[in-house]
Amino acid sequence: MRPISRFFLTIPLAFGVFLYAQETHLQTSPAPALCDPDTFVPSPALEVLSDTAGVDLRQYLRDVVRSIRINWRTAIPADAQPPSNKAGCATIEFAIEKDGKLTGMKLVQSSGDARLERAAWAGITASSPFRPLPEQFTGESLGLRFHFLYNPGQRGHLVPIRPGSGEWQSASAGENAGSGSATFEPQTYNGEPVYRVGHGVTAPKGTYMPNPSYTDRARKKKLRGTVILAIIVTPEGDVGDAKVVRGFDPEMDQNALNTVRTWKFEPTTKDGKPVAVAINVEASFNLY
């Protein structure tokens, strides 16, 4: 049998035009993308979709996250609390207008549990209206994407302590509970914003993407599995950062990580300008 490894780029966020109409009910059409709480590792938990034009919104975003988390926790259903600790995930996009009014809500990712979706939805709607946007922000509205993660680590998967360090630890059930406790400031790389595909950001196109090879140990043990990595593609088309978000064997995970770091892409653009973009990569190892 010949060992084969295959890579897939996964864009975990739905494409489409951002909706700027006030919604008072949970939007379910078109159907949101499905997310698996085992592999749902957003970074950061709150993403800024709008161009901030250099305005420092960190304190404003902290206040937004704090309010959403408080209201969300009061709406979490009983079976997602101890002792049941049901796992799940959801992603909602919305916008805040200059006066703090909530608009444009839509569910873009869900684990398929309507009760978890409603709790996440309520966390945002109960926080409205928000404080008015800072005067320095000149945009018409601030587009945001919030990731809700219920009870991470319930299945005992491993996460790297430091990307590329080779050190691993079990994800704690209380760590980043609800995902809102994770980093919520706009993700940056070398001081520049990192975008997700959609809303004028094109998907990266690989120009050099070799597959990782099996190690002798993995071949002898006939290991099979899938590694999911989160990477940042720089404006120059290089892989500027990469980390394992779900692995199946530390040695094979590191092998996949080392290979992905050599990849090259055509520059990703937003409105015609090269930008850094965050994507997920899935590596499947099989023996045929």
Image (cartoon, rainbow, N blue to C red):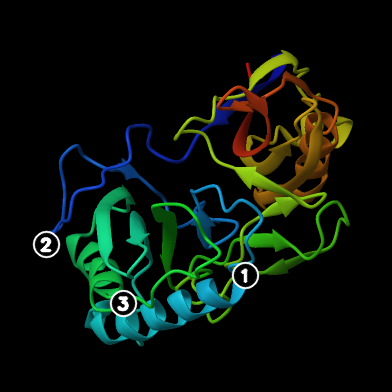
Q: From mark 2 to mark 3, how far is it between C-alphas?
A: 24 Å
Relative to residue 97, is residue 223 drawn left or right?
Answer: right
Amino acid type at circle 2 is: Thr
Badge 1 amino acid: Ala
Foreground mark, 2 or 3?
A: 2
Q: Residue at horizontal 32%, vertical 34%?
A: 17
Residue that appears at 52% across and 71% down: 61
Mark positioned earlier in the residue sequence (2 or 3):
2
Residue count near mark 2 (Cα–Cα under 10 Å), binned few <14, some 14–19, many ≥20? few
Classify residue 273 by image quadrant: top right
Mark 1 touching mark 3, by CB under 8 A?
no
279 to the left or right of 145 = right
Mark 2 sits on what residue? 24
- Mark found first going from the N terminus, 1 or 3: 3
The label shown at residue 171 is 1
- Whether residue 172 is visible: no
Q: Name above or below for residue 235 compared with residue 178.
A: above
Is residue 199 shown to the viewer in this render? yes
Mark 3: give few (<14), some (14-19) or many (20+) Cα within 10 Å. some
Q: Which mark is residue 80?
A: 3
Q: Secondary structure at mark 1?
A: loop
Q: Within 10 angstroms of label 1, few (less than 14), some, or many (20 or more) residues?
A: some
Kind of residue indicated by mark 3: Ala
Q: 119 or 153: which is nearer to us?
A: 119
